[in-house]
Image (spheres, rainbow, N blue to C red):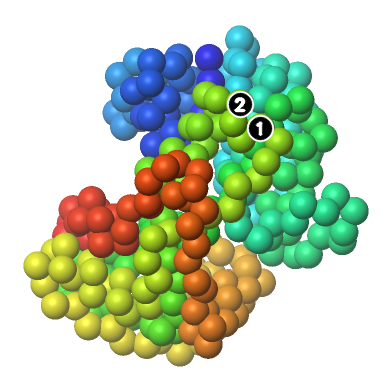
Amino acid sequence: MILVTGATGSVGGQVASQLHAAGVDVRALVRDPEKAKRVLPDGVEAVRGDLTDPASLDAALDGVDAVFLMWPLFGWDGADEVVATIARHARRVVYLSTIGASDDDTSEVEEGILGFHTVLERLVRKSVPEWVTVRPGGFATNTLGWAAQTRAGDTVRMPYPGAARSMLHEADIAAVAVRGLLTDELLGTAPEFMGNDVLTQAEQVEAIGRALGRTLRVEETPYDEAVKDLVESGVPEDYAHGILEAHAEMQANPVPTDTAFAELMGRPPRTYGEWAADHAADFRG
């Protein structure tokens, strides 16, 4: 039995689906089991629980051998208790981290996204006998933030349209995690990998337009407005500044791709264009 957290989200949903397709018993940790059943594959067990309430996890972890762990919060408050609870039940944890997290267990932890992923990785490494920390690069699903604009019209407003990086399909991120859950090949490792093609944000919008059969235009938003938009979407202000500073850096110095995914999985990752085609309905409305 494998417990999947974040099973109603993009990567977690793919992990649950791919495990289920492989014939594995899958349990999904969800806040609302009845609602979750409408999006989970038939046969996936939905159990109520919440990572913000470690006491709610014991029932979901009963009989579980391994856990796919995503951390849905900004910061690491409560993470030690959550990981300790998981470790009492499961022998293996595959944690969805991010590229750039630190392997050094003694270094000072920085604030921000890299910081909380580094803390979670440390907790997993010291708490469970079998672990994998999966470190993907950019998530293509982050660009679903433009969907409300493409549903409303043909203009997409964003900061730093020239910021360039490769983006990963959630199915490819999940495939690495599933390998970590089902085989011993990745145990004790932290595989880092990027997407297939380096595109600017403006070029990503063009790819979405091609998937929709429309011509979309990009309009750059000022920095202060972009911060306000992120904060209103629920991102803490210090994280918002960090995100935008990272995009400024990617505009000045595009992030190159690599061959790590192909070396891990024996095939290239899906392109951003393929991802856009798979999600055309989300952008069309």
Residue at (30, 77) in percent of width and height: 203
Q: Is residue 214 above or below residue 270?
A: below
Q: Is residue 23 above or below residue 198?
A: above
Given the image, on which type of amino acid does mark 2 rest? Asp
- Nearer to us in this view, 93 or 240: 93
Q: Is residue 241 above or below residue 279?
A: below
Given the image, on which type of amino acid does mark 1 rest? Leu
- Residue 84 placement: quadrant: top right
Q: Which residue is mark 2?
A: 184
Q: Which residue is mark 1?
A: 187
Instruction: Determine contact: label 2, label 1, CB under 8 Å.
Output: yes
* SS at mark 1 in the image: loop
Residue at (22, 83) in percent of width and height: 217
Q: Position of residue 161 (x, y in %)?
A: 39, 83
Q: Is residue 4 above or below residue 97?
A: above
Residue at (38, 77) in percent of width and height: 200
- Nearer to us in this view, 187 or 144: 187
Q: Position of residue 74 (x, y in %)?
A: 64, 55
